[in-house]
Amino acid sequence: MVCHCLSLFLQIFLQIMTMGLLARTSITLFLMVFLLKSQTLAFKLFSFRSVTHEIITRVAILETTIGVCRDQALREGRDFVPPRIVTEESLAAACSSPLSAKGFKRSIKKIVGRNAWVDVRHVFSAKHHFDDESFLRGRDLITKGVFTVKASVKQQRYECAREKLGEVLHTLQDFYSHSNWREMGNRRPYSNLIKPSSPIENIADSATCRSCIGNNCSGNILEQINTQRKLTSGYFNLVSSNKPEGKCSHGGFFDRSSGRDPKGGINKDDVDASHGYLHVEAAGTAIGATKELLEDIRAAAGDSEFLRLMGFTQTSVLCFVIDTTGSMSDDIAEVRRVTSSIIESRKRTSKQPSEYILVPFNDPDYGPLTRTTDPELFKSKMGELQAHDGGDAPEMSLSGLQLALTGSPPQTEIFVFTDAEAKDKWLKSTILALIERTKSSVTFMLTNAFSGRSRISGGPQFSSRSSNPLIGIYQELAQASGGQAIEVTKATLPQATSIIVDTSSSSLVTVFQAVRDSAKPEIFTFFVDSSLQNLTIYITGNPSYYTITGPTGATQSNTEPSGPLGIIEKVGNFHTVRPTISDQTGQWRIIIFSARPYSIKAFGQSAVDFLFDIVELSDGPHPSYAVLNSRPKANSNVTLLVSMLGGEMVRPTEVTLVDASTSESFNGTLEEVAIEVYLATIANVPAGEFLVCVSGESSSSRDPVHFFQRQFLTHLRTSNVSITVQSDAGTLEPGRSLTLPFTVSTSGSGGVFNIRVSNDRSFLMADFPSTLTLETGGSVNDTVTLTAPGNTPSGTDVTLTIEAEAPRATDFNYAVLRISVVTPVTDITPPVCEIVSVNANCSGNCSLLWWDLSANITDRNGSGIQRLAVRQGLATLNTSTVLDGGVNVTLAFLRASCCFPQAELVVVDSEGNVGSCSRSVTSTVSPSTSSPTVPTSANRAERPLGVPGFFWVTAGIILLFQFT
């Protein structure tokens, strides 16, 4: 294997010696990521020697983000030093945003996952893979998809943007593997694929291939096709050998057309493919094309929005769902106090919340959702809340929570404040579905739950779920999400809101949690590793007695507010244990005696964590995987795609599903399939509710190997019911309808199944059944039609949830779809930026001199100029607008220090089309070393990045850069 990798490296090295510096830099980073592992996901999925969609996408995102962070540092006068080992963690730290690593990795994971999804859901669609010479339709997919991404980012619908971006990138990358672009000698990307106003020219209109000689297909494309630079791609057919006369085939075991003359294929999907000898070069060009598309989105969105798209959020989100009925004035005042305290104490610090989200609810109204990065605007919105109305007790709490779940980022901590039961209980299963899909945690702050005047029930109050079913729905939702259902009086609410401060960190990890309904004593143990800081233990419920024993053997009970382990605080049914002992590493034990339900959660702050998705694997012509948007099937294998956080020295040794109520565990088999990515397969998982647990080892150059354990907050459930929705939901136009076929099936008993359909924007839904009758082990097809109002802003998304409930409500499953609402784009022409004059005299100390540039910017009959920005260099920009011959002309005047001799002016119209103009002047005298104007990173920008353990790779890279 090492010999093969070395041979491959030398081949690539010789190929890229003649490339330009930027191309060499791109391929260098690609080489290091590629050679870091010998088994990875592929241009196909699980290949042991080939470059993959995952690698191509990840490398391009990392490199593009390096450029964004470098430019931001330049503008802010900070130094930027690219990390030698480029990972999400190291790059987030280099970008002065170390706590963004988890969000960054989660976003890349979402994009990569949706990229892989295309090979599962569109395996036979020629346009999604540029098969069958479908260049015009493939380009149309890309350009329309890019407009959708830009519109979604403009509306801050980042999850939808990531999904569409992943889909678009798959099609773009496949062009370089499935066409003859590389065979024609092209090393640079085909930019017209992402420019809707540019033509796709010279598509082959004649025979393109001859049969391969045995297994040798290196010369099967006709010479005149490549010399005349005619575009072609392979035809693919799984069931028939039919293809146009004389045309090339895709090739491979599953392509029946490759057995018909001209035989063989031209794909470069992996090193063993028909044209596998060009696989690495095609992958290198695909990286360049991916970067080019990302740069276009970056230019349209701006650097700050691009970083948010990539998950760069330094801290967690502050999200409140608040009852505004008449009895809630005290609660609202307390939330205002906590909010103001958090904002003021963290203003302009690295701990300031990245976003603020507010959803009020009343009866019958709820919403709207406010989402902002401006803390002062959030405080203003909080100040506008007034307690009013609410004559009857139940309120629309779940409707408000639905808005929060669909309108906030994944894994958000959501706090719901109310003193009333839920009026919209029919949404319970929808909320469960959204919790499972978003992996967000919900904590309910239930005030006056013990008082006879409480609106939570009309009579006496009880604290347990079993004895008070009116608040049981809140407890069930909280426990399913890994949150709490805290019952306090209005007077003691301020003592309980400390949980908001505790959980407002993006580096929180859970080491243990458990939920119990039984009335027997229980013993729980968990391990705290040395990377964990600020260990905190929550016990929610009213256990009669409990003791906690630390690693040293010191013990403290709930009767001791202060003891040898630390501090125990109790308010209502909420207990907080804050250990103060200096050494918290080791085994902890909790013994609990309780006659009522309770939950335990132990958490802290650490960089070591994991992310997971439930996936279904797909064999076939393009082996891949798709992330499930529903519950996995019960009594069958469950496959998890697990991504580790904390650096390259973090390795899982065990992935298990633990029964949430009994702690029975089901162990999985682990397979490393990419850098820090593992497939865990758990066999024969029964129906039930489970916690996902990961145990492993981590180490560093300074510390020895140490053990860690982590649990995911959101519970995983299996089901005997399944719902599948047509794979290509597409986009929804304002004022138009979209019909979605779906299938409900059961692996259990038949009967009458209840069907519920809902969406988070109150869009009109029609033509769906309220019930379906299924036979045992059977399935039924039906449809639902969704209509968007005509005034829906382009870039909005709607979350549609389709649910199927088994007879007697014994089981249910769902499908959750996020659908973009996009107005058809009519303006596909970028604005024009024309440099009028340049005035530069930089022959002196550059820190004392300036150069000027003026440009005229027009959009003719387009959608209008929306934004101008300077992307290269450091400059001031002033603009004015004049009318010239009936055309609006924007006059741009740019002034830059001679220490920054390059400048690029980026112009974006309202549809997201990007134009630019740039100029470079020569500076002959450098500033003195004491000048604070020039960041020291300028001379380090092209430094090659290193990979540990691959000395020969590093040596080759050093050799490579000696020839630059």
Image (cartoon, grey):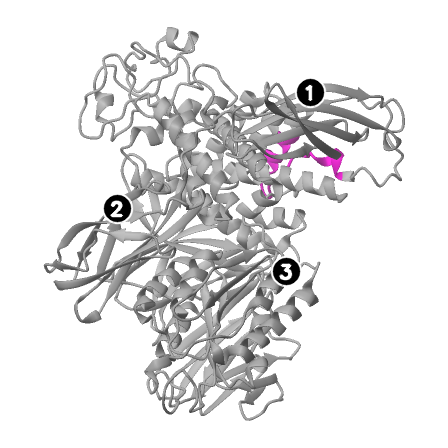
Say whether disc 2 or disc 3 marks the residue closer to the N-terminus.
3
Per the rendered image, the range of residues in magenta is: 937-958
Quarter of the image that includes the C terminus: top right
Q: Secondary structure at mark 2?
A: strand
Indicate which disc residue 835 carries: 1
Indicate which disc residue 740 carries: 2
Kind of residue sitting beneath label 3? Pro
Kind of residue sitting beneath label 1? Ile
> Closer to the camera, 591 or 932?
932
Q: Position of residue 941 (x, y in %)?
A: 70, 35
Name which residue lies at 15% across and 52% down.
Answer: 780
**Residue 41 seen anywhere in this rendered image of the structure:** no
Seen in the image, is 659 located left or right of residue 875? left
Mark 3 and mark 1: Cα distance apart in space: 40 Å
Say whether disc 3 or disc 1 marks the residue closer to the N-terminus.
3
Name which residue lies at 45% across and 88% down.
Answer: 542
Say whether disc 2 or disc 1 marks the residue closer to the N-terminus.
2
Mark 3 residue crowding within 10 angstroms, few (<14) / some (14–19) / many (20+) = many
